[in-house]
Image (cartoon, grey):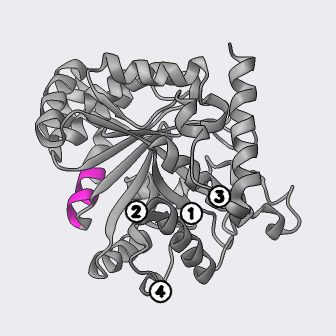
Amino acid sequence: MQVIKKLEEFKTLELMEKANKITINEHGLDITLERAIFLSWWCDKGDCAFCYMSTQKQNIKDPKTARRKVNAILAEAELCRRMGWNIEFLSGGYGSFSTSEIKSIAQQIYGITKKPVWLNIGITPDLEDYGEEIAGITGAVEMANPQKQKKVCPSKSIEDISEMLNIAGDLGFKKAITIILGLGETPSDLKYLFNLINDLKIDRVIFYSLNPHAGTPFENKSQPASLYYAGVVAATRITFPKLEIICGTWVDNLANMGPLILAGANGLTKFPLFKMFGTRYGKRVEEEVHWAGRNLKGTFTDFDKLLNGPPAGELEPYIKRYIDMCLKNKSLNE
């Protein structure tokens, strides 16, 4: 493909210029803030080479202790509502919650935000149990080259993920995949990604950059170069103009955001929200969006919106705990 060739020839700026025009024409100027809400810190599979959960089995004797309290999850959803953030998806490792429990949590979040949520809970055969509380299903592909993916994620094959997403589509759910850059892929591997998006009729792609975790094979690897990351996003945007693209970056790479927006991102994710809100780091996110010529949906600095909400009943202590965390980190970073 021409876009892959241009990326291989280091013509990233050319790709970004074209992708930016396409994004504005197809999606407008709005940029969303996205928050993945985790259900648990445990995964029965625990063998994805890059994932910190692969190091947890030796530390967690009882998986139930790694489950988050439901009220803490709901409090996080309420604060996202106040701040104007989207819930990127509910995420949990394999075996963390039952289908009925996840459905109940999703229903309660739907009641809070008035928006159905996405799920990213692994390969599940129980999609028919979900209803209007679910917007879409996310398949954690991570690498689209099937041979490389088998080595990095041995327990979740692309074939099984594809089958799940096809069923999801038949049931009327939207479909998404996650891709992590920096795991050993090359620009030529984009052909596998593009085929996957096309064949599965994917609605949303979520890109992340590698975050090396201690104790994993990637702990001493570098995160991908910012312009390589932007080039991959731009090539994807040019190839799929209507696709929703969410990009994740880390607090040590906030300067990635401007280029990623110009490359085609519709939303930004992967922030430690309650550590960054109201701090100079949160302000930096807003400035990156501003200087990319976009309109930010939601806030990373407005404490009035964070503090003011309807009575939350039994969620109130959990909400207060998160707000106190934000205020503490704001004072530490002033």
Whether residues under marks 3 and 4 lie with C-beta atoms below 8 angstroms apart, the answer is no
Q: Residue at image x 41%, y 18%?
A: 287
In which quarter of the view is residue 44 placed?
A: bottom right
Query: Distance of mark 2 from mark 1, alpha carbons?
Result: 34 Å
Q: Give the range drawn in magenta.
A: 193-199
Circle 4: residue type: Asp
Q: Callout 2: few (<14), some (14-19), or many (20+) C-alpha neighbours within 10 Å?
A: some
Q: Earlier in the sequence, mark 3 or mark 4?
A: 4
Q: Earlier in the sequence, mark 4 or mark 2?
A: 2
Q: Is residue 158 left or right of residue 316?
A: left
Residue at which label 1 appears:
154
Circle 2: residue type: Lys
Q: In this view, does 33 lie to the left or right of 92?
A: left
Q: Which image quadrant: the C terminus?
A: top right
Observer-side mark, 3 or 2, equals 3
Q: Which of 215 and 204 is in front in this view?
A: 204
Residue at which label 3 appears:
312
| SS label for mark 4 | helix
Query: Distance of mark 3 from mark 4, alpha carbons?
Result: 28 Å
Chief SS of the magenta region: helix
Q: Which of 8 and 83 is in front in this view?
A: 83
Circle 1: residue type: Pro
Residue 214: x and y, percent?
74, 38
